[in-house]
Amino acid sequence: MTMISTDVIDAGNEKAHAALEADYDHLGEQLSRRGIDIGWVKDKVSAYGVAVPSWGVGTGGTRFARFPGKGEPRNIFDKLEDCAVIQQLTRATPTVSLHIPWDKVVDLKELKQKGDALGLGFDAMNSNTFQDQAGQELSYKFGSLSHADAATRQQAIEHNIECIQIGKALGSKALTVWIGDGSNFPGQSHFTRSFERYLEAMKTIYKSLPDDWRIFSEHKMFEPAFYSTVVQDWGTNYLIAQELGPKAHCLVDLGHHAANVNIEMIVARLIQFRKLGGFHFNDSKYGDDDLDTGAIDPYRLFLVFNELADAELSEADGFDPAHMLDQSHNVTDPIESLMNSAMEVCRAYASALIVDRDALSGYQEGNDALMASETLKTAFRTDVEPILAMARLEAGGAINPLGAYRAAGYRAKVAAERPAVTSLGGGIV
Ligand SMILES: [Mn+2]
């Protein structure tokens, strides 16, 4: 089942094919002068995938307002179709990450079949105890897994276990837990006791994990709590993963740090101690803006991938991070933003793969700061787009996904079929 007519993709590819071949050959020649086989890079990019967040295909909005777009998905089945468009054109997003209860369905078999029919797998499950749902018995206003009340904590634990059960039926292998627990006033909550309660609750969830599953805890410095947050930084996150055991890892959302924090170094530390679970890619200027990946600081994204490529190529012990996007789209068509973001992630990966690591290592050992920096810059400045485009073309995708998407008129088509919805799970998470 394909969402975009292959005729549209073929027509676009035919027009762009000759130029791509020429650009690819030229880049191949440049890289071979540096001792890099372009085919090796392309194969690695082809094998790479980043998960699309189900909540990303709807217009997210901000904490102030949401301006719905036309033809927005009404439910998870519509969302999967939009995700399938992204995968069909970019060939970089073979899986979808679900958020429960936003994506809860009556018939899980039907959902799995829909995914299968669209060629989509299910990545990490995301639980939600940061807002109250209709009919929910106990409120999360004052916290969930770290709540002072044992019955509220139990309710949050049971929700996470339910997410695991749903994920099992869909073929997922991981649970991501982000809580909004924290305080707005000094003295409002006891730092140690609330963290103890959180750990105890997470240990109960951990016991319900199947053997081949992992649990990712996601830290976030602030918001919704503006004074203290229970899982506020990577240090706390590392403590959690250590306390829970080998199936527990840390998830790094690029927007969940203080401004100017050296995220790539955090990534290196987590890799070194085998606790890097995965990513939520996005970009930001001020806080947790959830802007499109690479929109503000593509060099930072590259530097994160430089650490990932280094670990991959040196076969670092226990290195197997899950890659996901986590964005909120306010002013763009979410499908266009997610396609571009997936390609930005692939670009950062390809650029990191062409870093001359032997040279870099030599400059590091020899204290040649300038040349070490230049070695990274040389890779970053190289336009790897022909590699990405060729990988897409060979996998049946579009040389120019954005062009193909617009030419296909997908949004107008679904706008006619999908009445506007006023509220849809999503937003900044
Ligand atoms: Mn996130």
Image (spheres, helix red, strand yellow):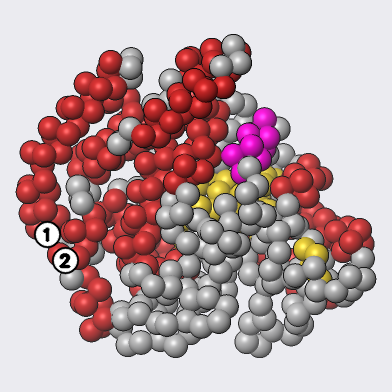
The mark found on residue 378 in the picture is: none
Q: Mark 2: is the Cβ under 8 angstroms from ligand 1?
A: no
* Mark 2: amino acid: Ala
Q: Position of residue 381 (x, y in %)?
A: 36, 34
Residue 90 in view here? yes
Q: Quadrant of the C terminus?
A: bottom right
Query: In the image, which residues are magenta?
Result: 263-272
- Magenta: main secondary structure equals helix
Residue occupied by mark 1: 8
**Residue placed at 39% from the left, 28% from the top?**
378
Left or right: 333, with 413 as reference point: right
Question: Decide: marks 1, 2 in contact (CB < 8 A)?
Answer: yes
Residue 268 is covered by the magenta coloring: yes
Residue occupied by mark 2: 408
Secondary structure at numbered mark 1: helix
Q: Quadrant of residue 275?
A: top right
Disc 2: CA contacts within 10 A as few (<14), some (14-19) or many (>=20): some
* Mark 1: amino acid: Val
**Residue placed at 91% from the left, 58% from the top?**
192
